[in-house]
Image (cartoon, coloured by chain):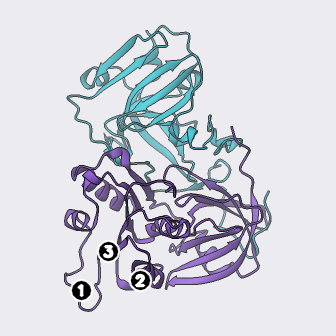
Chain colours: A purple, B cyan
Amino acid sequence: MSARLVWRVARLTAIRDETATARTLVLTVPDWPGHLAGQHVDVRLTAEDGYSTQRSYSIASAADGETVELTVQQVPDGEVSPYLGEVLSIGDPVELRGPVGGYFAWRPESTAPVLLIAGGSGIVPLMAMIRARRAAGSRVPFRLIYSVRTPHDIYYADELRMRARDDAGLDVAYAFTRAVPDGWPSPPRRLGVAEVNTHGWPADFEPECFICGPTGFVETVADILVALGHDPQRVRTERFGPSGA
Amino acid sequence: MGIISPGFRGRPRSPGPQLPPGQYLTEDFPVLSAGPTPRIPLETWEFSITTEAGTAYTWSWPELTALPAQTPTVDLHCVTKWSKLGTGWRGVSLDTLLGDVETAADFAMARSYGGYTTNLPLADLLDGKAWIVYEYDGEPLHPEHGGPARLLVPHLYLWKSAKWIRGIQLLLDDVPGFWETAGYHEYGDPWREQRYQGD
C-alpha cells in the first residue's frame, strides 16, 4: 500500500514542435518523484465553472529531476489536446499526477534485448525508453521499428537520427504507410511480417517487446510477434483509442 | 476542485447523463490490454470456479451457453477515463454459476487465458451485479474485447471485468491481481474515483 498519488501543479516551461500537429510540452513539476520510461501521467483541466476533465499521456522524457515532457498529438474535435496544443502557454499551470503504470515500462537494470514497435504517436513512451537507455549508459541492444504515415509525421526526427548514429547498439527502422521519402526502396505499405522479421529480433533472443500505437496496429503487430514465436508474456502492449482524446 | 486552467472551457455541457468524476463519454469501444490478444478455440475453452478447498466446478462452451442467459444493458467506465453508456450484452449471471458452489470465501480472483488476473470481493459478483458474457451488441464477443467470454462487473472500473476469462478462484484472503499489483486501486469504484492505490 503506497501513499495516494497527489495532484501536482506543473508549469509549462518550454514548447517544441514535433510535427505540424504534435508538440512537446516541457513541464516543471515540483517534487516530482521520478519515473520509469513507459509510464504515464494523468492531466486534469478545470474550467472556471468547475467543470473538470482528465486524460492520460505517456511521458516522453527520461527521468530528469523536476522536468517531465509530454508530446501531445492534436485530435480533431478533441477536448483536451487542442487546449494543451494551442492554448496552454509558457508559465501556465496544469495539474498532473503520476507516474502511473509499471508494466509497460523499461528498467535500465534489465539486460534482455529490446524491440520497440511504434505506430504513429505510439512512439512517445518508446522514445522515453531510448532516452532512458542513453541516460543510464546502458549497452542493451535496442531496435526500434517506427511506422508513420509520411516522413513529415516522424516525431523526434533529428534526435532519432542522431541517436541511431551515436548510441551504440540502437537500430532505427522506418515503415511508411502513405508516402515514402525520395529514393525509398519500396512503396508505402502497412507494417507486416516481413518488416517485423527483418528489423526485429529473432524470437530465440528472447527480447522484451514493447508495442504502442492505435488498437488495430497493436493487434496486428502483437499477432505477428506471437506467430513469429515470441512468448506472449514478453510482448507488452499499449493501445490508443479511438477515444476522442 | 482543482486549480483553474486559464482559458479552458471544455466541451459544451448539456444536461446529459451523469458520469463518474474524471470520466468522459465515448461512442467508440476502445481497447485496453497489457499484451497480445489470446485466441482460444471453443472446442478446448472451459471456465472453472475453484473453491478455497480446491473443489473445481467446470463448464465447457456448450455447457456454459446452455445455461439460462440474461441480456444486461450497462454503462462501462474505464480507468483510462472513457465511459460508454448503454452497452448490451448476453451471458450467464454469476448468481447462476455460483448457485451450487459451497464456499466460505469472501474474495475472488478472476484468471484469464493469457495470464491476466484481477481480484474483487465475492459479494461484488453476486446479486445480479456480474456476468460471464459471450455476446456484445447481438454478436459473438470479439477477441479484442475479451471473446470468447469475459467477466462483466460494470459497477467497477473495467479492468475488473477480466477479458478472456478462464476461471474464478475463491479465496479466504484478498490477494492483489495484475493491475492491483501495479498500483491500481484494490476495489475500483468509479463513482468514488478509486483509480490508484490510496484513492
Give the secondary structure at mark 3: strand
Packing grade of label 2 (10 A; few <14, some 14-19, many >=20) is few
Give the secondary structure at mark 1: loop
Chain hosting mark 3:
A
| Residue linked to disc 3 | A173
Q: Please provide percent x and percent y for residue A27.
A: 68, 73
Looking at the image, the residue that sits furthest to the bottom is A182
Q: Please provide percent x and percent y for residue B37.
A: 33, 46
Chain hosting mark 2:
A
In the image, residue A135 above or below residue B149? below
In the image, residue B94 above or below residue A241? above
Quarter of the picture containing the C terminus of chain A is bottom right
Does residue B168 appear left or right of residue B36 in this picture? right
| Residue linked to disc 2 | A161
Earlier residue among tags 1 and 3: 3
Packing grade of label 1 (10 A; few <14, some 14-19, many >=20) is few
In the image, residue B151 above or below residue A164? above
**Residue type indicated by callout 1:** Trp
Quarter of the picture containing the N terminus of chain A is top right
Give me the C-alpha separation between circle 1 and circle 3: 12 Å
